[in-house]
Image: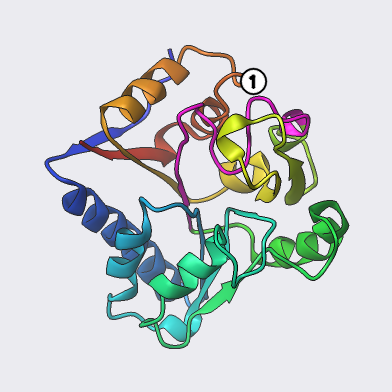
Amino acid sequence: MTTFPFLSFPSRPAAEEALAAALEAGVRDAHAEGRRARIALSGGSSPEPAYRAFAAKDLDWSRVDIALVDDRWVDVDQAGSNQAMIQRAFASATGVTIFGMKLPTSSPKLAEAELDGVYRALRPFDAIVLGMGPDAHTASWFPASPDLAACLDRQSPATVLGVDASLAPVAAPYLERMTVTLPVVSEAQQILILVFGADKKQVLQQALDAPVTNAPIKAVIDATGARCVALWAE
């Protein structure tokens, strides 16, 4: 069985503060080395309080780049936009640069080349925050997606891929996605997985013994080992 650090916290706010502190440490390390800090964040409702806590840290935000791990193919003013949530969460972080994934093209596939250039310039990331769905997906790597194998290809030169999520029930109603690939995640200095609730804990534990095609989160753990840390609270 694959093993990796799994940290349990007495409350969700405690886990959120631990995530914020880990991200702060990553930014300070980058700045101490004389370079910009680069962070990639996932969307969803669970991490927003942690992002707000991170945004409240006393940092030189003008030297911090934040990119998205994935997003639904919707405009930033529409429901479901991860970019919109991250922009809200970092409203107090004056000077921060946020890179969105939704471009004015008709489909994610047509945006791949342009976004690939953006992400190629940003990588490697100092830290990446991931979540996990009830089907053990992470980013927009869905077990039922025809694009899963390409997303999880460790030798892929692609940094981002458009994803057809139409066969993944948990993705509805957002059936088109854009996501980073496994090589982008696996090269990051630290990978932080935020999960809440007994159900998600069980899904994560079961994923360790599952094939990556059934539990894509396992691909991250297999590729990164001790650099991947789960933060959990009931």
Give the amino acid at mark 1. Answer: Thr
Q: Could you tell me which residue is drawn at 42 percent across and 82 percent down? A: 61
Q: Is residue 2 above or below residue 77?
A: above
Does the image show residue 30?
Answer: yes
Q: Which residue occupies the foreground of this view, 73 or 155?
A: 73
Quadrant in which the C terminus appears: top left
Residue 144 included in the magenta stretch of the image: yes
Residue 194, horizontal then vertical, whole percent: 36, 44
Q: Secondary structure at mark 1?
A: loop
Q: Position of residue 134 (x, y in %)?
A: 45, 29
Name which quarter of the figure residue 58 lies in. Answer: bottom left
Q: Main secondary structure of the magenta part?
A: loop
In the rendered image of this protein, does residue 212 appear above or below residue 134?
Answer: above
Q: Residue at x 76, y 68 (%)?
A: 103
Which segment did they paint magenta? 127-149
Q: What residue is disc 1 on?
A: 213
Horizontal relation, residue 122 to residue 87: left or right = right
Image point 66% across, 68% down: which residue?
75
Q: Residue furthest left?
A: 10
Percent position (x, y) of residue 80?
A: 55, 57
Structural crowding at the residue carrying mark 1, measured as other residues with C-alpha within 10 Å and reported as few (<14), some (14–19) or many (≥20):
some
